Image: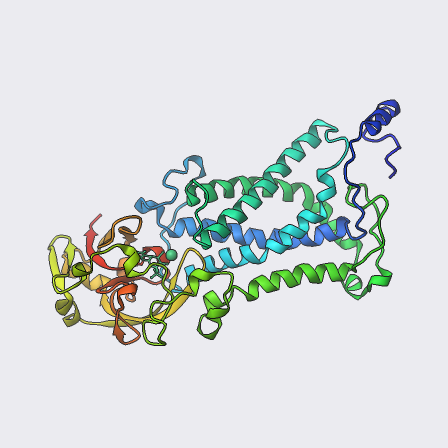
């Protein structure tokens, strides 16, 4: 449609005045922009971002809000239906959080390409045409603003880079709900049209079309197709390959943080999951975020005088020798950090449920684990199911050796499917609570 024709129900003289008032806005000329290309990326994001949303909300639940450890603590009307996070399969949080962080990163090139594809709409003239269109533009502002906000805060968080002066969790959670609202509205408004548009061209044909035969899409009035398209410098399949290749590159530079082993050093985008405690190939050579030194704990408190205090109906104190004399259990369990990295190791120690029974609370409603460390990792609460799982341990050993100081010596908690942050290191006490 030519911009000199009357449109949008404006009378012709008004339309001409609007056109005359047009500031020197960029005239987009890429012949690849069009509703089909936008719809392809839209459908990829519809599926991908839905997974990122669901796994993100699951992470909020996995933290155990019912035990008073939701972050952010008070979410008002944004409360989710809470359930006890299961302990089986043991790789559950490894999977959900790995997907949340990993897929979130992999989709960044697709989000950027989608924004590129609709860029002309941002500069549409006149900027305001009707009430409905103003509302749509506002909802798009929320959609684009919140996805960029979620990407930036998420990426900064996994780089340990708290440059922003607000709580990451509160911001990321609130931003998520703004995004969810705008995303649902956007999908409801656009999906029927996207499906129709996708049917209008065959993906297979596009993938067979070389540069020489690449033509602009038909102008459907969506404002995406250039009025005066330039000659293509890239085929449509080339553009798809570029975006897909970017996503694969991000995936390739991140998988190492979950797969581990020889691939761990290749996780270049995720420095946190690559650092190890003892780089000696020994039993304690696996990732560590926070070393013993950075915990600020006085090393003498982990020495001969160390006891774990068990609080319950029969409070007790056990030293390392007493713990080692109790029945020992070994389990292969992951540590899965909220930042996406994970590692599976073989842990040995005393079952938490045996300690609960020793403390006179064989069926605890919950347990509160405290660390020698002060600060954000000082305490973590466990649900009844997490205490009673037969693989839940107060671990004393890892991979057949004594736990290294960086990994929580003299004792650390390890529970199947528990977010890594609650696998408290340098345990000082466990309080078993009855209902
Ligand atoms: N006392 C204490 N326990 C802790 C931590 C910590 O910093 N201090 N880090 C937690 C986090 S965030 C994770 S993911 C796991 C593994 O962290 P690590 O790599 O620092 O051992 O231990 C958890 N337990
Ligand atoms: Mo973590």
Q: How many marks?
A: 0
Depth order, front residue of 92/83: 92
Residue 5 lies in what quarter of the image? top right
Residue 334 lies in what quarter of the image? bottom left
Image height of 293 relative to 135, above or below: below
Rendering colour mode: rainbow
On the image, the x and y values in percent for residue 140 come to 64, 38
Q: Is residue 190 visible?
A: yes
Depth order, front residue of 333/265: 265
Q: Is residue 170 left or right of residue 315?
A: right
Q: Residue at x 42, y 59 (%)?
A: 93
Q: Residue at x 17, y 71 (%)?
A: 324
Q: Is residue 90 left or right of residue 207?
A: left
The quarter of the picture where the N terminus appears is top right
Q: Is residue 42 visible?
A: no
Residue 332 lies in what quarter of the image? bottom left
Depth order, front residue of 31/208: 31
On the image, the x and y values in percent for residue 121 come to 73, 40
Dividing the image into four equal quarters, which quarter contains ligand 2? bottom left
On the image, the x and y values in percent for residue 329 come to 25, 71
Image height of 410 relative to 66, above or below: below
Q: Residue at x 56, y 66 (%)?
A: 252
On the image, the x and y values in percent for residue 123 come to 73, 37
Image height of 276 relative to 360, above or below: below
């Amino acid at each position: 449609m030519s911009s000199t024709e009357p449109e949008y129900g404006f009378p012709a003289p008004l339309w001409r005045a609007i056109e005359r008032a047009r500031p020197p806005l960029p005239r987009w000329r890429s012949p690849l922009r069009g509703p089909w290309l936008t719809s392809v990326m839209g459908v990829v994001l519809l599926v991908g971002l839905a997974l990122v949303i669901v796994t993100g909300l699951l992470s909020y639940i996995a933290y155990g809000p019912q035990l008073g450890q939701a972050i952010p603590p008070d979410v008002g009307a944004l409360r989710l239906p809470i359930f006890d996070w299961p302990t089986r399969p043991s790789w559950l949080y490894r999977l959900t959080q790995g997907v949340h962080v990993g897929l979130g990163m992999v989709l960044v090139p697709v989000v950027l390409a989608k924004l590129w594809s609709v860029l002309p709409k941002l500069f549409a003239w006149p900027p305001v045409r009707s009430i409905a269109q103003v509302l749509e533009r506002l909802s798009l502002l929320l959609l684009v603003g919140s996805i960029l906000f979620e990407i930036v805060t998420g990426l900064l968080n996994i780089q340990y880079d708290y440059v922003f002066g607000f709580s990451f969790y509160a911001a990321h959670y609130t931003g998520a709900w703004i995004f969810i609202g705008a995303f649902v509205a956007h999908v409801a408004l656009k999906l029927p049209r996207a499906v129709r548009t996708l049917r209008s061209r065959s993906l297979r044909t596009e993938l067979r079309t070389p540069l020489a035969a690449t033509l602009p899409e038909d102008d459907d009035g969506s404002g995406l197709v250039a009025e005066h398209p330039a000659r293509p410098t890239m085929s449509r399949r080339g553009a798809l390959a570029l975006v897909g290749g970017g996503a694969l590159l991000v995936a390739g530079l991140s998988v190492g943080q979950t797969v581990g082993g020889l691939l761990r050093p290749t996780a270049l985008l995720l420095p946190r999951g690559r650092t190890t405690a003892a780089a000696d190939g020994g039993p304690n050579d696996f990732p560590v975020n926070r070393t013993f030194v950075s915990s600020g704990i006085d090393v003498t408190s982990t020495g001969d005088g160390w006891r774990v205090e068990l609080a319950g109906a029969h409070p007790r104190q056990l030293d390392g020798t007493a713990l080692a004399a109790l029945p020992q259990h070994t389990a292969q369990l992951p540590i899965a950090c909220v930042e996406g990295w994970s590692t599976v190791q073989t842990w040995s120690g005393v079952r938490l449920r045996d300690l609960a029974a020793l403390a006179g609370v064989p069926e605890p409603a919950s347990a509160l684990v405290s660390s020698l460390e002060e600060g954000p990792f000082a305490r973590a609460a466990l649900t009844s199911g997490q205490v009673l799982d037969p693989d839940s341990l107060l671990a004393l050993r890892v991979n057949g050796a004594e736990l290294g100081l960086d990994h929580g010596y003299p004792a650390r908690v390890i529970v199947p499917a528990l977010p890594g942050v609650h696998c408290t290191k340098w345990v000082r006490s466990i309080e078993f609570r009855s209902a």
